[in-house]
Amino acid sequence: MPKNSKVVKRELDDEVIESVKDLLSNEDSSDDAFKKSELMVDDQEEKDVDVEEGSDVEDERPAWNSKLQYILAQVGFSVGLGNVWRFPYLCQKNGGGAYLVPYLILLLIIGIPLFFLELAVGQRIRRGSIGVWNYISPKLGGIGFASCVVCFFVALYYNVIIGWSLFYFSQSFQHPLPWDQCPLVKNASHTFVEPECEKSSATTYYWYREALNISSSLSESGGLNWKMTICLLAAWVMVCLAMIKGIQSSGKIMYFSSLFPYVVLLCFLIRGLLLNGSVDGIRHMFTPKLEIMLEPKVWREAATQVFFALGLGFGGVIAFSSYNKRDNNCHFDAVLVSFINFFTSVLATLVVFAVLGFKANIINEKCVTQNSEKILKLLKMGNLSQDMIPHHINFSSITAEDYNLVYDIIQKVKEEQFDSLGLKSCQIEDELGKAVQGTGLAFIAFTEAMTHFPASPFWSVMFFLMLVNLGLGSMFGTIEGIITPIVDTFKVRKEILTVICCLVAFFIGLIFVQRSGNYFVTMFDDYSATLPLLIVVILENIAVVRIYGIDKFMEDLKDMLGFSPSQYYYYMWKYVSPFVLLCLLVASIVQMGLSPPGYNAWIEDTAMEELHSYPTWGMIVCISLMVLAILPVPIVFMVRRCNLIDDSSGSLASVSYKRGRIIKEPVNLEGDNTSLIHGKSPSEVPSPNFSKNIYRKQTGSPTLDTAPNGRYGIGYLMADMPDMPESDL
């Protein structure tokens, strides 16, 4: 070989890395160098962009301080109030321990695969929900906007629940608790118990009359409830302050808001197990009713709970994962967070039924005492014969078992006259069988149980502080699902957008703190999210599997994770999950059609709830909520289909990173046809092939190789190459 050929060869070796061994040996150093790497067309352009005021350069994209912070954020978002007051109700209603079987099956079929899919696309493309689906196909960009609308609707009423919890939290610093006894009413002649409270219970009266001061119908607004208005304002101020700096501020709060609920749940479990009747509650909870498990309704409700428990379709999962490195093991994250969510639900169920078992035991003891006194009166009056009563029975200290023995004997002997005696069967199972969920569980049943705890104010403070933290964790993810996509797409300042979003949400949320506000919360909870989110997730699945391509997506996962994910996910995403989601959508529509649309109104005179139908304007609002939530999908599709907006003008395809900053690239570039090198629109961009990227040494660094080796997604060209503009991402 000629001498000058050797010189040329050495120069090429200095500039181009071709050896797999060299790539692997420099892999670790590329991690640090990646953060400092530059993408540039030439040195002069870089200087101009960096110093030019009013340019499109943004600050470096935030990143999680640690993997723990990120996991806590995802856990805080997925583990919410539904784990505490929805899952135990469904478990009790749908077969006890047998309900866990369909729940686990559906968690494996739709829960983990779809959660993994959202984590992967967010981490792969590093955008919020709007940017992710716009990148995959501009015609499907409406999916991201629909997620934002649903997040906004949910945030409106979800923060009201945090406001309710704040009110109860503020009222817990007194002994006895204000909902411990019915209030007394004084008039000129005598003092008597408040009739509405006497007909219901102390905790029920306090919830409906003292806290909500509820009206008797949806149409009767009754004006603002100022106590709840102040609590709602406090809740939005907390959310705004926590989110104003994005994950830099909310990430630190996650250490407390995500972990504190587990401390409280464990404390309640230990305390609950030491109470009389707690074992009866847990036994009732996990006694399997296998015949119920075969009903289609059980599977539909289990699928719905899996779907909403993980926060699928909201965009919060995508937003959080977009702040990860591209080589993060999102498969591990998906499995870990999903099972943490499941075991949290089981832990909350144990706590709820340990406490409800204690409450049922107290109510059962009162029932035995009252009915034993009735039997003694009947014996004295001669209506019952003393010969009926077994000799070992002592009515002064009668047990529940002895009372039920006497009750059965009297029922058999006095079969024809039994109803007129007015005796009740005091069975603890009857009390435990009264299914309660939502606000009925948290603000009525659970608060009543805590009034019987020793040091009840302490436990009340802990419980409602736990509810506040559970709510805030979910709110952070919900607001992130709104803020991140808009910031990524429209390049607005996050601080200003966060403040505006919270202010607008607070003023709209005033409809929920009217005296009729609880009925609006029920309306939004029933109609604003269920169907729109199902449609969103179905479209997400179709976008990845059919539009982007399941094979290309599996290759991307292999590149990000460093290993090929199981073929299990391939078949779940391509066949099983879409089919199950479509079945769930059809079942939800049928259920909605069969169930008369209405709400439970509190009637003051009877101190009971009555089912009322929505007025005509209420039905219009319900339908509008569903239509508005899903409307962005067809609108964006038609706009793109009819070319009303140029894909290349200001689209995400013209955005790329420079020193971790986002800059806009020139469009309509000429020259090489490689779409990853030239700024083509997302619809023209094929899936990047990581194995064929060109890696060059970083400018000004003769020794440090910064080739990402495919670990950060699409290839970063680390060279000063005037003839090559920056890549799309």
Image (cartoon, helix red, strand yellow):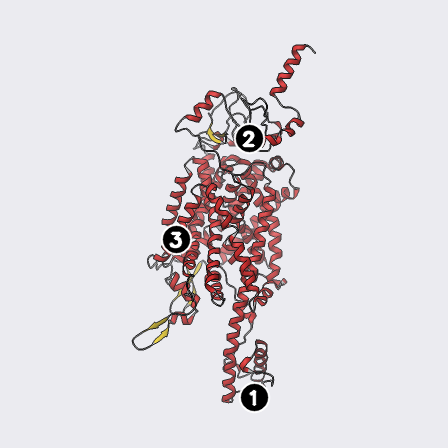
Q: Residue at the location (52% across, 68% down)?
A: 359
Q: Is residue 446 above or below residue 118?
A: below
- Mark 3 burial class by Cα count in 10 Å: few <14, some 14-19, many 20+: many
The image quarter containing residue 719 is top right
Whichever of labels 2 and 3 marks the residue nearer the N terminus, that label is: 2
Asked whether 270 or 696 is in front, the reply is 270
* CA distance for labels 1 and 3: 61 Å
Left or right position of 446 against 189: right
x, y percentage for residue 89?
A: 53, 60
Q: Is residue 251 above or below residue 443?
A: above
Q: Residue at the location (39% across, 28% down)?
A: 53
Q: Secondary structure at mark 2?
A: helix
Asked whether 422 or 50 is in front, the reply is 50
Residue, disc 1? 386
Closer to viewer: mark 2 or mark 3: 2
Indicate which disc residue 652 carries: none
x, y percentage for residue 57?
A: 44, 30
Residue, disc 2? 34
* CA distance for labels 2 and 3: 44 Å
Q: Residue at the location (51% across, 48% down)?
A: 255
Indicate which disc residue 232 carries: 3
